[in-house]
Image (tube, rainbow, N blue to C red):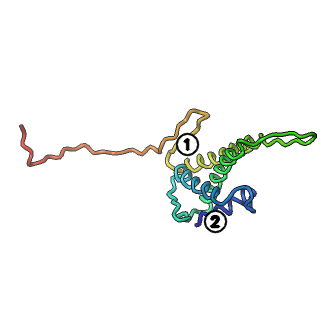
Amino acid sequence: MLASDLVTLLRLDIGDTAGEMLGDEYLTRCVTRAVYAVNKDFGTSFAVNAGEIAPDPSGEQQEYLLLKAHINVCSLMRSITANNFSFQSGDKQVDKTKQPSFWADLQGDLEDDYKGRVKGAASDDGGTVVDDPDNGIMAAPAIRPAIYEHGYVEEPDVALK
């Protein structure tokens, strides 16, 4: 699957089909960052090479990538709008200072949805614990026992001293 295909779908999700809000380079970066996050969170092994995501993500995996990319867009927009202004001239007033908080609210809602999906997938993953900072739980890999057999290997060339 081409990363540009996900960029097109992401544009649809963020309501920017005309490309007026963000350029392709920004959205491609958001998709690329999403690939690495989804790999970490879901245990997948996607790679981005020459604008192509391999192996092709399934429909559900595609949705995970888009959701995480959307979260990355919100973070980017918070940065972009952080220096917005407010002014008043006569009876006209423009206040763009609240835009970062609106993006933060959307980011928080999307992150909650994403974390819920990660937790749902983790229940099938043999015990992977997902970050839950509200309850003081840290991420830990699934616990897998290692079984060793006791034994002794005698080496014939070693002389006892």
Pick the front one: 34 or 79: 79
Quarter placement of the N terminus = bottom right
First of labels 2, 1 by sequence position: 2
Residue annotated with mark 1 = 130
Q: Quick check: can you spot residue 105?
A: yes
Which disc number belongs to residue 77? none
Mark 1: which amino acid?
Answer: Val
* Residue farthest to the top, as pictured: 136
Quarter placement of the C terminus = top left
139 sits left or right of 5 in the view: left
Mark 2: which amino acid?
Answer: Asp
Q: Residues within 10 Å of mark 2 (few under 14, many from 20)?
A: some
- SS assignment at label 2: helix
Pick the front one: 82 or 61: 82
Pick the front one: 88 or 160: 88
Question: Residue at horizontal 62%, vertical 54%?
Answer: 30
35 sits left or right of 97 in the view: left
- SS assignment at label 1: loop
Residue 15 locus on image (x, y percent)? 75, 57
132 shown above or below 25: above
Number of marks in picture: 2
Gap in Å between the C-alphas at discs 2 and 1? Answer: 29 Å
Which disc number belongs to residue 5? 2
* Residue farthest to the right, as pictured: 91
Question: Residue at horizontal 74%, vertical 58%?
Answer: 20
43 shown above or below 4: above
Q: Can you tell which of label 2 and label 1 is closer to the viewer?
A: 2
Q: Residues within 10 Å of mark 1 (few under 14, many from 20)?
A: some
Residue 98 locus on image (x, y percent)? 77, 40
Residue 80 locus on image (x, y percent)? 69, 47
Question: Residue at horizontal 59%, vertical 33%?
Answer: 135
